[in-house]
Amino acid sequence: MPTFDDRKDAFENKFAHEQNLTFKIEALRNKLLGAWAAEVKGLDQEKTEQYIKDVVKSDLQEAGDEDVFRKLKADLKGIVDDQDIRSKMKEYLQAAKDKLSNS
């Protein structure tokens, strides 16, 4: 049944593409969050680059966004409240979606 196999392959390819796009969007969002948090913390350029990498790596600890949120919350304690962090997470997620959808 070539038709069934073709449909199965198409669904698998679509799923793989969507997963790849989701990963790229979240990685870009985390880079943007890292740059924002580094600016809030007043880090220099060298430390900013490392901090961005640390934020991106923090997302690999568990599924979902809570690992990134916890890192930012701990790092920005006394500077930025939870609501502002979550707001930035949403803002940068949309910015990442917009950027990657248009490219």
Image (spheres, grey):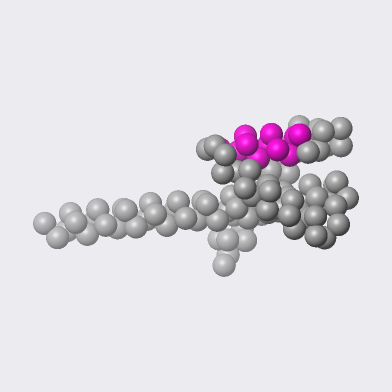
Identify the magenta region.
64-74
**Residue 92 in view of the camera:** no
Q: Residue furthest left?
A: 1
Quadrant showing the N terminus: bottom left
Identify the image quadrant of residue 77: top right
In the rendering, at what x and y percent does residue 94 appear?
A: 64, 50
Q: Residue at x 24, y 53 (%)?
A: 8
Camera-side residue of 44 and 27: 44
Identify the image quadrant of residue 95: bottom right
Identify the image quadrant of residue 65: top right
**Residue 77 in view of the camera:** yes
Q: Residue at x 14, y 60 (%)?
A: 2
Camera-side residue of 37 and 61: 61
Quadrant showing the C terminus: bottom right
Q: Residue at x 80, y 60 (%)?
A: 46
* Magenta-drawn stretch, dominant element (helix, strand or loop): helix
Q: Is residue 59 above or below residue 27?
A: above
Q: Residue at x 63, y 43 (%)?
A: 58
Left or right of 10 on screen, residue 5: left
Q: Residue furthest bottom?
A: 103
In the rendering, at what x and y percent does residue 60 appear?
A: 56, 44
Left or right of 42 on screen, residue 94: left
Q: Is residue 86 above or below residue 26?
A: above
**29 drawn magenta:** no
**69 drawn magenta:** yes
